[in-house]
Amino acid sequence: MLPLSVDSITALISQYEYIAIFVLMLLESIILPIPSEIILPFTGFLIALNKINPYLGAADAVAASVLGSIIGYYLGLFLGVDVFLNYSRKAGLKDTTYYSGIAWIKRYGVYFAFFSKLLPAIRSIASIICGAFKMDFKRFIIYSTLGIAIWSGALIYIGYSLTSRWMSAGYDIASITPYIVIIAIAVLLYFLRKPIMNLFRRPGR
């Protein structure tokens, strides 16, 4: 259940503009269920009405998402390791799997950091995962920011282009989210199938 309704989100942005965009996108990036599929198209709609500067609006959204991703990264770095090990042991995995995961994400994690920011259902938890597996911070920031910029720019442009139909566009994106996630994960797994197989391969095999 969303902590804020669509009407509440649009009312906040209409009244507080840049501050509301920043706060909402920041919270959305720290695993809270606040849909960027509503925030960003509505921002584009306000840009079309000349109520928000397009450059400041886009920069505001991207900066908030990057900051939220950094917070999520450090949450995973300082809190996620113990949580991961605890649940992985209960699932029957050995600690060596965790350390293999660290090596894997250091080598291939840039793909995950980038593509996850283009996926509505995963983008909020991706930073925590990267932090838990100790991905290189500089690479995490670069590729996450690139993904965030593409996602934010695309949704703002959709809202700007469709003007009064911005809400239906947001709902359409949300409705096909499961299919987007499935397809993206399938593509990612295809390209990374060899390193994933090596990750779980038993020593000596």
Image (spheres, rainbow, N blue to C red):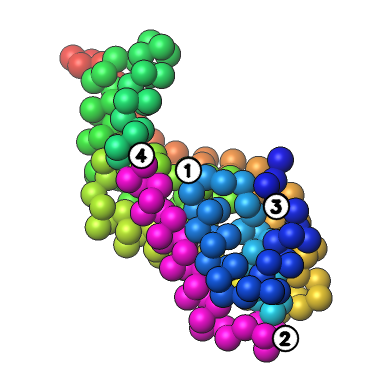
Which residue is label 3 attached to?
A: 4
> How crowded is the residue under tag 3: few (<14 C-alpha within 10 Å), some, or many (20+)?
few
Q: CA distance from mark 1 to mark 2?
A: 33 Å
Q: Where residue 125 is drawn, which disc sits there?
A: 1
Query: Tag 2: residue type?
Result: Leu
* Disc 1 element: helix
Majority secondary structure in the magenta region: helix
Q: Is residue 163 left or right of residue 124?
A: right
Q: CA distance from mark 4 to mark 2?
A: 40 Å
Mark 1 touching mark 3, by CB under 8 A?
no
Mark 3 or mark 2: whose residue is earlier in sequence:
3
Mark 1 or mark 2: whose residue is earlier in sequence:
2
Residue 92 part of the magenta segment:
no
* Whole-percent x, y for residue 5 in the image: 75, 53
Query: Tag 1: residue type?
Result: Ile
Mark 4 touching mark 2, by CB under 8 A?
no
* Disc 4 element: helix
Please, is residue 22 above or below residue 83 in the view? below
Q: CA distance from mark 1 to mark 4?
A: 9 Å
Q: Which residues are magenta?
A: 47-76
Mark 3 or mark 4: whose residue is earlier in sequence:
3
Of residue 164 and residue 56, the one placed in the foreground of this image is 56
Which residue is label 2 attached to?
A: 49
